[in-house]
Image (tube, helix red, strand yellow):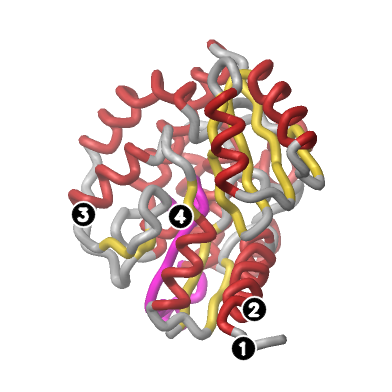
Amino acid sequence: MNAVVFPGQGSQFKGMGKELYETSTLAKELFDSADAILGYRISEVMFEGSDEELKQTRITQPAIFLHSVISALSMGEVFRPDMAAGHSLGEFSALTACGCLGFEDGLRLVYARAMAMQECCEKVPGAMAAILALNEAVIEDICARTEGVVVAANYNCPGQVVISGEVRAVQEACERLKEAGARRALILPVGGAFHSPLMEPAREQLSKAIGSTTFKTPICPVYQNVDARPHTDPEQIKANLLAQLTAPVRWTETVRNMASDGMTEYMECGPGKVLTGLIGKTLQSIRTETGAEG
């Protein structure tokens, strides 16, 4: 069975989507449509903008969504996955590419999410940090015992967890995690504390946007971040999208579940190959556990 996966925030790069625009008639039409929907030329920012512009949440999220979804739609009949998943923002790309959301609805929803999250970032400064080579239970325990808000936010692959929360709490947790044996505890260059309780103020705004959007049954099961399980029911998908704001991204578990459900091939659709690397590490871990490789 083949799976298609869609990346999240952080995979953007200057010039993203330009080749698609220049080589595909459909891609050009969709980029032009996106410019009209958003009311500004996001395609111009993607193709020619600076790295700093692309790092702004209100730009980054719709830009990655567009690159990912247009890449998938440009494949036409070739795009026939048996299962799909997306990392954080990528979940919206997966749902749109798989027909759960229309292109315009998906873009509007992602933009509403981006603006709501940007507002949270501006009101309450937050931070995220990547923790390498430390047991997940130890990370969770130290976060729970650190004063302030700091939680495990992204379970990316075996040996890589991202924590998120208040700036001071994240910094303190990083020091404690290094003392506990983490190989690295690296503060990430992001604009806020995504997938943490600090995103709670964005819930009402995103809830309204989701509530006014039409969701359909996707063409294949989409494994969602909050529970790492496959979903096709539109109402459950909507509830999971809202919960995703403050819940951790269970990517390691998602990959394990897709593999258990028969995934033999996978393709990353969108900018970069970050997820391809994470999936490879998780599958290697599974092979080691089962003795498939020495």
* Front one among 73 and 168: 168
User: Disc 1 to disc 4, how far (Cα)?
Assistant: 33 Å
Q: Which mark is residue 288?
A: 2
Question: Disc 3 residue type?
Answer: Pro
Q: Secondary structure at mark 1?
A: loop
- The residue carrying mark 3 is 234
Residue lying at 32% horizontally and 37% vertically, measured from the top left = 242
- Disc 2/disc 4 C-alpha distance (Å): 32 Å
Tell whether label 4 touches label 1 (CB within 8 Å): no
Q: Residues within 10 Å of mark 4 (few under 14, many from 20)?
A: many
State the residue in front, 83 or 279: 279
> Which-is-in-front pick, marks 1 and 3?
1
Magenta span includes 62:
no
Query: x, y percentage for residue 60?
Result: 61, 39
Q: Residue at x 65, y 69 (%)?
A: 23
Mark 1 to mark 3 CA distance (whole Å): 38 Å
Comes first in the chain, label 3 or label 2 = 3
- What residue is rendered at 55% in x and 38% in y? 140
Could you give the CA–CA distance between mark 3 and mark 2, rounded to whole angstroms? 37 Å
Looking at numbered disc 2 in the image, what kind of residue is underneath it? Thr
Disc number placed over residue 93 in the picture, else none: 4
- Within 10 Å of disc 2 (Cα), the crowding (few <14, some 14-19, many 20+) is few
Disc 2 vs disc 1: Cβ atoms closer than 8 Å?
yes
Which residues make up the magenta segment? 73-92
Residue type, label 1: Ala
Residue flagged by tag 4: what amino acid is it? Ser
From the image, tell me which residue sits under label 1: 292
Q: Position of residue 51 (x, y in %)?
A: 78, 37
Q: Secondary structure beneath disc 3?
A: helix
Q: Residue at x 56, y 50 (%)?
A: 155
| Mark toward the start of the polypeptide (3 vs 4) | 4
C-alpha separation, residue under disc 3 versus residue under disc 4: 15 Å
